[in-house]
Image (cartoon, coloured by chain):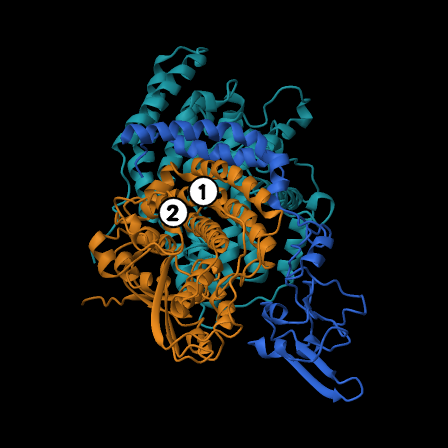
């Protein structure tokens, strides 16, 4: 199946989505849809910021922002305006070019992920990219370069520490992340995000509970969400890599943080929660399902952020290499065997089997797992 | 060719989100590992000991409010005890009970802050901190009702307390006593068994019994290391010998033990308050003490168990209206001396967890 | 990080936070919603009674910050001291209330205001006209004056606000929890 997807015939899909009769052809299409994507991302990010601040406020027995507009819904807008009007301060000893480029390099790849995310049946900017999963994982880790540039370029020790932590985390969490997606790809039989969505007659969260957990955790670690938010741990290294950023550049990093959360929620929705598929809604409005699922996933992230303490850097590394990686490899092999052995149309058998596998693996893994070395003799 | 390496020196503070005030640590790092640490303090020095030499005995009480500003009642208590000891003043029964209730409420309030701050430094994003502050708010309400202020109470006086409890105090206290155990249980449920918290604090920053005793560490930090030393029991002051309460101790002496000791002590404090509230007699709350106390020539040292540890006031009198010399044994300062030993070898992330678990208030360190 | 409890601790913590999502927030929105302060509040000002004050200056002697300045002149007609200047620099005042406590003629009161921020330091200085009790503009607090305290509104307490609305649903579960914990501890002993 995978072979057939890589067939050149399928490039026709791309051409079908690109309207050839647009004046100016590709470039007009690119301009219009990029604008749409940027705006959609910005609006969703604002919604995310609102949800995070209100939800977290209520969980902390506070109210959260409630002054700007009804229920404070314009608070993110007010924040954005405030931050854009701030003075842009660059440290004297900073590497000016790197410092200036860093937010851009962090921001653009995050935006590029949305090019292939299917918002509805056949709805995505770059059409049905047949190597979507590869594209997403490849592009998604580029923002690390921007983060590292920010840490290096701003000539601040806290920033440097934060950036180092970020690189270490991304390098080690990329592995379980990709391996857990690989089992999804095995099930769907395609690297295209559209086909992965269409293959989910049963949402893959039921077929692949362990892969879902690993993907969620590894994803959280990659985008600096709690409990893996060591790169901007405010109680340790002040603000991590964006300590020396202010004004518009800081706004960019802030945007990246939430845009990455949005991207991760969108990917989780696509890979595990059935994407835009859902009952009740007519085909043209199925993107509403997508948005709803994205919000649910994000709410879980807010929830964990509110509750959980932060792990230490050696524990973070150990958790990835000693716990997530073996589990994801075993899960991948188990899934591969199941896909080979099980006859067509008996997917439901995998639900109990995989839940059992997940439970057993977590129990065994928990007993053998001790990350971190604790005190180092110096 | 050999590559040259330099130690990575990081100045943490004096303005840092989790140094509890203006405290600076000069940290030498090897990657993430702390290889050396030098505490730098004195940013909050106000010369309280010297100022006190210019003031009357009664006028020093507002200054003690500003020592450990999150446990002002305890400081008041320690100071008035030492003056009473020096001048030989007897305190009415009811005043003693009120003092004990206030000191124990203050202990709970102070522990709530430090537990919240400790959990916050472990990285739980302000949630425990906000919950703890909510409970503290209830105590602060009671203090406000009694003394009229929310932070610098200036409530205790030489020879008693400034005013009797208002009539609405005791019903409010009863309500608080009914609610607080439920809240403590709920916060235990929030993070007590949390795997990440256990990983971050169990076995981290182990303060051995010997180091603790040699460094004359006191308070929960000492009891966390398994030494059963509480001045309320070891040298009972005021009326603490009349109450039943346990001294919770830890075993390993790590950050988690210090955190658990504080939580258990809050339960014990509630027990003491309950007993004091039942036994409290009626009567005057203040003996007749001259407006300007003139203790006889001599010196004295009185110490109490504050939330931070042993707070002692050393007073020298020359029969004038103000002390000749006053020295404050500030528990935070003494506990700070072991910090370097605890931190070396741990990661930066542990640095603040250990710092938070020791519980330091800069107002008291710098004075 | 050994998962001794297989994530049970994390799940318990998550249940607490999600429960708080459904409870009422405990904060109040300050400029609009004002809580009643304590009846004994020591506000950022002093209130002085012209009629009762004899000009003995006990308050000024008691004040350790040197915030009170008083000037008197003898009035030979009624054989009393006339208070010519009574000035409190609230910038120096630490609101300790010792002056109120010391006043032998019950002529000095703490105020009840707490919003006394000013743009200039000299605006913080109160003259005797600003702080006159007889003018009736300012409400004296009940600090050391039980009669005044009784007339003031009851203090709003967070304890009372919480019991009625929120603590009830939460009370059931943690209680059972404590029992199990206690029995576990007893077993250990």
Q: Subunit of mark 1?
A: B
Give the CA distance from mark 1 to mark 2.
9 Å
Q: How many marks?
A: 2
Q: For chain C, what colour was chosen?
A: blue
Q: Quadrant of residue A236?
A: bottom left
On the image, the x and y values in percent for residue B222 come to 29, 53
Q: Quadrant of the C terminus of chain C?
A: top left
Viewer-side residue, A150 vs A308: A308
Tell me the shade of chain B: orange
Q: Quadrant of residue C13?
A: top left
Q: Is residue B190 above or below residue B342?
A: above
To which residue does mark 2 refer? Answer: B242
Q: Is residue B232 visible?
A: yes
On whether disc 1 and disc 2 are found on a single subunit, the reply is yes
Q: Secondary structure at mark 2?
A: helix
Front position in the image: C142 or C20 = C142
Q: Mark 2 and mark 1 in contact (Cβ < 8 Å)?
A: yes
- Which residue is pictured at 42% across the width and 36% down the height? A217
Compared with A220, B58 (above or below) is below
Relative to residue C80, is residue B127 depicted above or below? above
> In the figure, what tint was chain A given?
cyan
- Provide residue B114's location: percent of width, then percent of height: 43, 52
Observer able to see residue A132: no
Tell me residue B169's x, y (percent): 59, 48
For the N terminus of chain C, which image quadrant?
Answer: top left
Among the 4 quarters of the image, the one containing residue C134: bottom right
Q: Which residue does the numbered mark 1 point to in the structure image? A: B275
Left of B237 or right of it: where is C118? right
Q: Residue at x 42, y 57 (%)?
A: A237
* Mark 1 surroundings: few (<14), some (14-19) or many (≥20) residues within 10 A: some
Chain identifier of the residue bearing label 2 in the image: B
Q: Residue furthest left?
A: B1
């Amino acid at each position: 199946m995978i072979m057939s997807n890589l067939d050149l015939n399928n490039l026709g899909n791309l051409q079908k989505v690109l309207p050839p009769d647009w004046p100016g052809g590709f470039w007009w299409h690119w301009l219009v849809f990029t604008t749409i994507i940027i705006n959609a991302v910005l609006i969703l990010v604002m919604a995310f910021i609102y949800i995070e601040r209100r939800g977290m406020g209520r969980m902390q027995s506070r109210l959260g922002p409630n002054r700007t507009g009804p229920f404070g819904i314009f608070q993110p807008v007010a924040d954005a305006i405030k931050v854009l009007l701030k003075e842009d301060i660059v440290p004297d000893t900073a590497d000016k070019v790197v410092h200036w480029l860093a937010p851009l390099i962090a921001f653009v790849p995050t935006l590029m992920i949305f090019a292939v995310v299917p918002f509805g049946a056949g709805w995505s900017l770059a059409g049905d990219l047949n190597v979507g999963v590869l594209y997403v994982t490849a592009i998604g880790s580029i923002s690390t370069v921007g983060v590292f540039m920010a840490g290096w370029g701003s000539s601040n020790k806290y920033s440097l520490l934060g950036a180092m932590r970020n690189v270490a985390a991304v390098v080690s969490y990329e592995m379980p992340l990709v391996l857990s997606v690989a089992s999804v790809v095995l099930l769907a039989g395609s690297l295209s995000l559209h086909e992965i969505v269409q293959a989910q007659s049963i949402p893959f969260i039921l077929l692949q509970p362990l892969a879902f957990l690993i993907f969620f955790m590894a994803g959280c670690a990659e985008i600096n969400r709690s409990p893996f938010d060591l790169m901007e741990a405010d109680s340790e290294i002040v603000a991590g890599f964006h300590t020396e950023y202010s004004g518009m550049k800081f706004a960019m990093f802030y945007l990246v943080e939430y845009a990455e959360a949005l991207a991760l929620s969108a990917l989780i929705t696509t890979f595990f929660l059935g994407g835009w598929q859902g009952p009740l809604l007519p085909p043209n409005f199925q993107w509403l399902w997508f948005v709803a699922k994205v919000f649910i996933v994000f709410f879980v992230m807010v929830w964990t952020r509110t509750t959980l303490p932060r792990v230490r850097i050696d524990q973070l590394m150990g958790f990835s290499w000693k716990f997530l990686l073996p589990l994801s490899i075993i899960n991948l092999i188990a899934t591969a065997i199941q896909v080979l052995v099980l006859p067509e149309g008996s997917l439901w058998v995998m639900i109990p089997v995989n839940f059992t596998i997940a439970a057993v693996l977590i129990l065994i893994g928990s007993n053998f797992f001790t990350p971190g070395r604790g005190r180092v003799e110096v | 060719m050999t590559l040259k390496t330099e130690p990575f020196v990081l100045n943490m503070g004096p303005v840092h989100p989790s140094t509890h005030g203006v405290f600076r640590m000069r940290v030498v790092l090897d990657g993430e590992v702390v290889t050396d640490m030098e505490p730098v303090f004195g940013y909050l020095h106000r010369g309280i000991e010297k100022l006190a030499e210019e003031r009357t005995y009664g006028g020093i009480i507002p200054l003690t409010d500003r020592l450990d500003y999150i446990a002002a009642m305890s400081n008041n208590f320690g100071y008035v005890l030492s003056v009473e000891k020096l001048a030989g003043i007897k305190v009415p029964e009811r005043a003693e009970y009120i003092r004990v209730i206030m000191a124990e409420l203050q202990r709970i309030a102070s522990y709530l802050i430090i537990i919240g701050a400790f959990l916050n430094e472990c990285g739980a994003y302000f949630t425990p901190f906000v919950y703890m502050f909510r409970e503290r708010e209830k105590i602060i309400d009671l203090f406000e009702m009694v003394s009229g202020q929310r932070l610098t109470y200036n409530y205790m006086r030489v020879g008693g307390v400034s005013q009797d409890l208002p009539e609405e105090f005791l019903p409010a206290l009863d309500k608080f006593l009914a609610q607080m155990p439920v809240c403590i249980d709920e916060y235990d449920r929030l993070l007590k068994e949390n795997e990440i918290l256990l990983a971050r604090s169990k076995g981290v920053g182990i303060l051995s019994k010997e180091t603790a005793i040699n460094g004359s560490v006191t308070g929960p930090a000492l009891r966390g290391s398994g030494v059963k030393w509480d001045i309320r029991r070891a040298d009972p002051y005021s009326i603490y010998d009349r109450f039943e309460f346990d001294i919770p101790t830890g075993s390993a002496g790590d950050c988690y033990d210090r955190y658990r000791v504080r939580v258990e002590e809050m339960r014990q404090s509630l027990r003491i308050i309950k007993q004091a509230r039942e036994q409290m007699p009626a009567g005057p709350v203040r003996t007749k003490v001259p407006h300007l106390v003139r203790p006889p020539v001599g010196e004295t040292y009185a110490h109490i168990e504050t939330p931070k540890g042993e707070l002692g006031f050393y007073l020298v009198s020359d029969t004038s209206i103000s002390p000749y010399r006053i020295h404050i044994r500030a528990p935070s300062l003494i506990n700070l001396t072991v910090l370097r030993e605890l931190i070396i070898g741990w990661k930066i992330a542990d640095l603040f967890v250990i710092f938070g678990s020791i519980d330091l208030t800069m107002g008291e360190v710098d004075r | 990080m050994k998962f001794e409890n297989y994530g049970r601790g994390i799940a318990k913590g998550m249940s607490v936070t999600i429960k708080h999502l459904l409870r009422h927030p405990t904060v109040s929105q300050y400029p609009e919603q004002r809580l009643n302060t304590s009846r004994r509040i020591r506000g950022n000002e002093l209130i002085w009674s012209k009629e009762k004050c004899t000009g003995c200056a006990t308050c000024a002697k008691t004040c350790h910050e040197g915030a009170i300045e008083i000037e008197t002149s003898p009035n030979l007609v009624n054989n009393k001291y006339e208070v010519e200047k009574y000035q409190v620099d609230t910038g120096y005042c630490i609101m300790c209330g010792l002056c109120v406590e010391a006043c032998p003629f019950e002529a000095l009161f703490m105020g009840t205001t707490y919003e006394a921020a000013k743009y200039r330091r000299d605006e913080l200085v109160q003259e005797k006209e600003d702080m006159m009790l007889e003018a009736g503009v300012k409400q004296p607090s009940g600090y050391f004056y039980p009669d005044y305290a009784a007339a003031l509104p009851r203090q709003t307490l967070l304890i009372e606000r919480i019991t009625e609305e929120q603590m009830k649903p939460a009370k059931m579960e943690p209680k059972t929890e404590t029992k199990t914990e206690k029995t576990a501890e007893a077993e250990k002993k």
